[in-house]
Image (cartoon, rainbow, N blue to C red):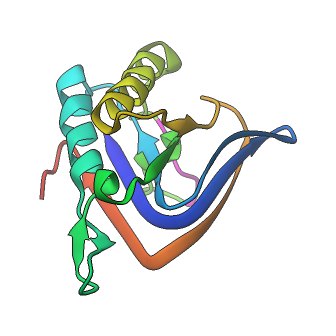
C-alpha cells in the first residue's frame, strides 16, 4: 500500500456534482492498493497515519497528531499511485489491485482509521471520477509505502 498524506486546512471530494466528503484541519490521504497488499499492510499504514505527528504544538514544532488537534481524514482511493513509468510515456497500472481485492482493503482502512481516531473518516467513491479540492498546509506532504518502510 502507498499513501500520500497531505496536511490540510480543508479538503473536499465531489463526484458528479455531489460532495461525498469534506474536512477542515487534518489529512487528505490518497491511498493506492496493490495485489501484494494484506490486512497487515493496512493495519500498519493506518497506525502510521493516525499517529503521524506533523501538526504544530505551542512552540510551532511538529509534535501533535490528529487526535491531539481533533483533526479529520478525507480518504481517497487512487490506483495511479502504482503507475509504472519506466517504459514509454503512457503509464501502466498492472501493479494496482483490481477492485475485488482493493475494495475490501479500502473499506477496512476506513473502519480502522475511524476506530483509531474514534470518529468518521470522510471518503470519495471508489473507482469514481473524483474532483478533489484542498488547501495544503505548510505544505506538508508525506509518502508512506508498506513495502518500503523508511
Residue 28 lies, with reference to residue 62, above or below; the image says above
Q: Position of residue 80 (x, y in %)?
A: 51, 46
Residue drawn at (24%, 23%), measured in percent from left and top? 38
Residue 8 inside the magenta-drawn segment: no
Q: Which one is in front, 64 or 108?
A: 64
* Residue at (33, 46) in percent of width and height: 2
Which residue is drawn at the image coordinates 46% and 49% (left, top)? 72
Which stretch is magenta?
89-93
Can the viewer see residue 57 in this picture? yes
Task: Locate residue 95: give its quadrant.
Answer: top left
Q: Quadrant of the C terminus?
A: bottom left
Is residue 92 highlighted in magenta?
Answer: yes
Residue 114 occupies quadrant: top left
Query: Quadrant of the image for the N terminus?
Result: top left
Give the quarter of the image for residue 42.
Answer: top left
Question: What is the total number of numbered labels drawn onto the structure image?
Answer: 0
Residue 72 as seen in the image, left or right of residue 56:
right
Q: Is residue 19 left or right of residue 100?
A: right
Residue 25 rendering spot, x and y as whole percentages: 50, 61
Q: Tell which of 84 and 76 is nearer to you.
A: 76
> Is residue 92 at all visible to an observer of this figure?
no
Q: Would residue 41 appear left or right of 81 to someone viewing this image?
A: left
Would you place residue 63 above or below residue 98 in this image? below
Task: Pick out the residue farthest to the top.
Answer: 100
| Residue 107: percent from left, percent from top | 44, 21
Q: Position of residue 66 (x, y in %)?
A: 33, 54
Residue reaching furthest to the right: 17
Q: Is residue 17 above or below residue 128?
A: below
Could you say which is closer to the camera, residue 66 or residue 98? 66
Q: Main secondary structure of the magenta part?
A: loop
Instruction: Name the foreground residue: 79 vs 95.
Output: 79
Amino acid at each position: 500500500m502507498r499513501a500520500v498524506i497531505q496536511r490540510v486546512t480543508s479538503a473536499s471530494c465531489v463526484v458528479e456534482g455531489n460532495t461525498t466528503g469534506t474536512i477542515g484541519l487534518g489529512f487528505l490521504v490518497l491511498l493506492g492498493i496493490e495485489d501484494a497488499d494484506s490486512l497487515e499492510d493496512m493495519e500498519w499504514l493506518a497506525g502510521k497515519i493516525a499517529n503521524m505527528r506533523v501538526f504544530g504544538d505551542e512552540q510551532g514544532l511538529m509534535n501533535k497528531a490528529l487526535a491531539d488537534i481533533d483533526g479529520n481524514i478525507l480518504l481517497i482511493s487512487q490506483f495511479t499511485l502504482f503507475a509504472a513509468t519506466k517504459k514509454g510515456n503512457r503509464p501502466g497500472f498492472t501493479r494496482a489491485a483490481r477492485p475485488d481485492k482493493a475494495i475490501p482493503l479500502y473499506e477496512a482502512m476506513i473502519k480502522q482509521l475511524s476506530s483509531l481516531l474514534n470518529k468518521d473518516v470522510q471518503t470519495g467513491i471508489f473507482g469514481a471520477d473524483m474532483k478533489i479540492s484542498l488547501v495544503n498546509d505548510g505544505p506538508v506532504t508525506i509518502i508512506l509505502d508498506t513495502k518500503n518502510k523508511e
